[in-house]
Amino acid sequence: MLSALLFPTNLIISVFFAAILPSFIVLLSNIAINLGKISSYYEINYLCKLLIIEKSSSNFKKLSKLTKQNTKQNMWDLCREIIK
């Protein structure tokens, strides 16, 4: 008799967790993706400021990998737009 009374509660709890767990995973994934975008924005901003001060080839390479720009002129144009 006691187990019959607890069964609906256990069912409700399991359905609740089955609905909440995927939502929580999607939410955490979305947060991780957005933090990655924010991080790369700040890294590009930092590298552009560093590039204006110190024009080293390693800074050009790092910025090229992040922005997928091939020429130095394109990177300069991008940095001018970002620094404004």
Image: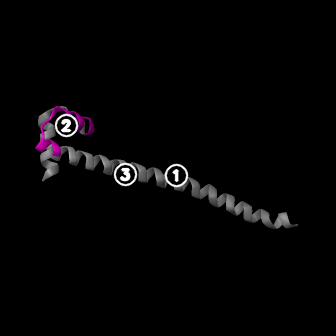
Foreground pick, 66 / 56: 56
Where disc 2 sits, the SS reads helix
Dot 3 corresponds to which residue? Answer: 35
The type of residue carrying mark 3 is Leu
Which percent across, then down, holds residue 5? 81, 67
Asked whether residue 48 is drawn in magenta, I would say: no
Dot in front, 3 or 1:
3
Q: Which residue is drawn at 72% across and 60% down?
A: 11
Q: Which of marks 3 and 1 is nearer the N terminus?
A: 1
What is the chief secondary structure element of the magenta stretch? helix
Range drawn in magenta: 50-66
| Distance CA(mark 3)–CA(mark 1) | 15 Å
Q: What residue lies at 21% left-to-right and 47% top-to-bottom?
A: 46
Residue kind at label 2, given as amino acid type = Asn
Which residue is label 2 attached to? Answer: 59
Q: Is residue 26 left or right of residue 15?
A: left
Q: How far apart are marks 2 and 3 (CA)?
A: 23 Å
Of mark 2 and mark 3, the one earlier in the sequence is: 3
Q: Which of marks 2 and 3 is in front?
A: 2
Query: How far apart in space, not on screen, are marks 2 and 1 (Cα)?
Result: 36 Å
Give left or right: position of 68 versus 72: right
67 with respect to 54 (left or right): right
Q: How many marks?
A: 3
Circle 3: element type: helix
In the rendered view, tell whether residue 72 sits above or below residue 22: above
* Coordinates of residue 10 in the picture (x, y in percent): 73, 61
Q: Dot 3, how many residues are within 10 Å of its Cα: few (below 14), some (14-19), or many (20+)?
A: few
Label 1 is placed on what type of residue?
Answer: Ile
Residue 53: x %, y % from top left: 11, 44
